[in-house]
Amino acid sequence: VQARVHNVLDHIICPTDEEEKQKIAQTKANDPNLWNRLDAVALQWMYATVAQDILSSILVINDTAESCWKRIAAMFQDNKHSRAV
């Protein structure tokens, strides 16, 4: 919800629509400082809301919100398979 409110959802989940992808690329190219700051905000929210043991597993230098989100999702996806067995 916070990512939508602050209009940073595209930093976490890349859109699949080509037109939206082009808009995001243009925005990123027009103001890279703003893009990086908003990406850091989204990344900070993720870091602040995960458990400490998960945080130590996902911290990466010069990370992006999208990459971090993918690592978190993969951790839970892997856990889902092991619980099913």
Image (cartoon, rainbow, N blue to C red):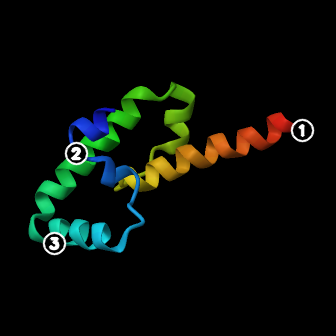
What element does badge 1 sit on?
loop
In percent of width and height, residue 23 lies at 22, 68
What element does badge 2 sit on?
loop
Asked if disc 2 and disc 3 are in contact, CB closer than 8 Å, the reply is no
What element does badge 3 sit on?
helix
The mark nearer the N terminus, 1 or 2, is 2
Q: Mark 3 — residue?
A: 29
In percent of width and height, residue 56 lies at 52, 36
At label 2, counting other C-alpha atoms closer than 10 Å, the crowd grade (few under 14, some 14-19, many 20 or more) is: few
Q: Quadrant of the N terminus?
A: top left
The residue depicted at 18 percent of the width and 57 percent of the height is: 35
- Type of residue at label 1? Val
Give the quadrant of residue 59.
top left
Q: Residue furthest right?
A: 85
The residue depicted at 32 percent of the width and 54 percent of the height is: 10
* Circle on res. 77: none
The mark nearer the N terminus, 2 or 3, is 2
- Type of residue at label 3? Ala
Q: Mark 1 — residue?
A: 85
Give the quadrant of residue 21.
bottom left
Q: In the displayed structure, does residue 34 sit left or right of residue 61?
A: left
- Type of residue at label 2? Asn
Pick the front one: 7 or 29:
7
* Circle on res. 7: 2
The mark nearer the N terminus, 3 or 1, is 3
Q: In the displayed structure, does residue 74 sit left or right of residue 29?
A: right
Distance, label 2 to label 3, CA atoms, is 17 Å
The relative height of residue 65 versus residue 46 in the rendered view (above or below) is below
Distance, label 3 to label 1, CA atoms, is 46 Å
